[in-house]
Image: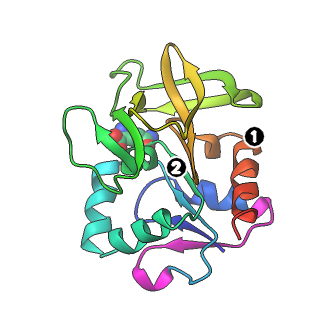
């Protein structure tokens, strides 16, 4: 059962895509929504500050952090990437504090806030990337050789894989291309 954090943001699109791929999904809005047999977790795009506040208020932060640390595969897009990062440029408060990268929020400025590009995401060739007020990854943090950079666009890191995490600053759920979700689904099948 794949859980999709559904406090705010683009959760419906992920749900639709994963269901089309034959996955069982559950929207997570409160503690009791989290199934014991959680095989994957999606952290969706939206507004990371709002999501972080709600995670704390609803007492979901620690329980989800535990699952992430225990190796449950995570697909994180845009705001989800910010929630996972160990560092946020400007010293802003972190949330799950797990992914060894420094992210820069709203990094492309106002005019370039939303744009599209096509690029390779690791071995996935020519993937259509949609950026919406996107962050980028300023750097991966030192002495963590487990972080694999999957894409660089315009000189900026936009996608990484780290242990059980697949994280990107763009929105694969807003395209018709299911290859990133397929990769994530494969990760959820290989865990146990
Ligand atoms: N700008 C948002 C934030 O900082 C992220 C944008 C998105 O998820 N599309 O949280």
- Tell me where residue 77 appears, x and y as whole percent: 52, 45
Q: Nearer the viewer, residue 173 or 76?
A: 76
Residue at horizontal 30 percent and vertical 58 percent from the top: 52
Q: Is mark 1 within 8 Å of ligand 1?
A: no
Q: Nearer the viewer, residue 110 or 68?
A: 68
Specify the quarter for ligand 1: top left
Residue at horizontal 40 percent and vertical 32 percent from the top: 135
Q: Is mark 2 within 8 Å of ligand 1?
A: no
Q: Identify the image's colour scheme: rainbow, by chain, secondary structure or one colour.
A: rainbow
Q: Which mark is residue 130?
A: none
Helix, strand or loop for disc 1? loop
- Give the residue at mark 2: 76
Mark nearer the N terminus (2 vs 1): 2
Quarter that holds the C terminus: bottom right
| Residue 23: in magenta span | yes
Do the CB atoms of the residues marked 2 and 1 lie less than 8 Å apart?
no
Residue at horizontal 42 percent and vertical 70 percent from the top: 66
Task: Work out how far the residue at label 2 is from the one at label 1, CA to CA, in angstroms.
Answer: 16 Å
Category of crowding for the residue at label 2, using alpha-carbon neighbours closer than 10 angstroms: few (below 14), some (14–19), many (at least 20): many
- Give the answer, above or below, for where 188 lies relative to 138: below
Residue at horizontal 32 percent and vertical 66 percent from the top: 55
What span is colored magenta in the figure? 19-33
Residue located farthest toward the front when viewing the structure as drawn: 143
Helix, strand or loop for disc 2? strand
Q: Quadrant of residue 123?
A: top right
- Give the residue at mark 1: 177
| Residue 4: in magenta span | no
- Tell me where residue 136 appears, x and y as whole percent: 42, 29
- Tell me where residue 159 appears, x and y as whole percent: 55, 34
């Amino acid at each position: 059962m794949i859980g999709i954090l559904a406090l705010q943001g683009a959760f419906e699109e992920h749900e639709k895509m994963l269901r089309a791929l034959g996955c069982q999904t559950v929207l997570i809005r409160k503690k009791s929504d989290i199934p014991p047999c959680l095989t994957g977790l999606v952290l969706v795009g939206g507004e990371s500050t709002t999501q972080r506040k709600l995670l704390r208020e609803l007492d979901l932060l620690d329980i989800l952090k535990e699952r992430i640390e225990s190796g449950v595969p995570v697909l994180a897009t845009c705001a989800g990437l910010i929630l996972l990062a160990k560092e946020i440029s400007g010293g802003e408060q972190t949330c799950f504090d797990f992914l060894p990268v420094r992210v820069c929020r709203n990094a492309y400025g106002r005019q370039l806030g939303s744009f599209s590009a096509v690029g390779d995401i690791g071995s996935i060739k020519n993937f259509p990337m949609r950026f919406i007020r996107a962050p980028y990854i300023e750097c991966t943090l030192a002495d963590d050789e487990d972080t694999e950079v999957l894409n660089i666009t315009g000189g900026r890191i936009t996608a990484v894989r780290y242990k059980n995490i697949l994280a990107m600053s763009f929105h694969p759920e807003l395209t018709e291309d299911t290859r990133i979700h397929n990769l994530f689904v494969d990760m959820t099948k290989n865990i146990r």
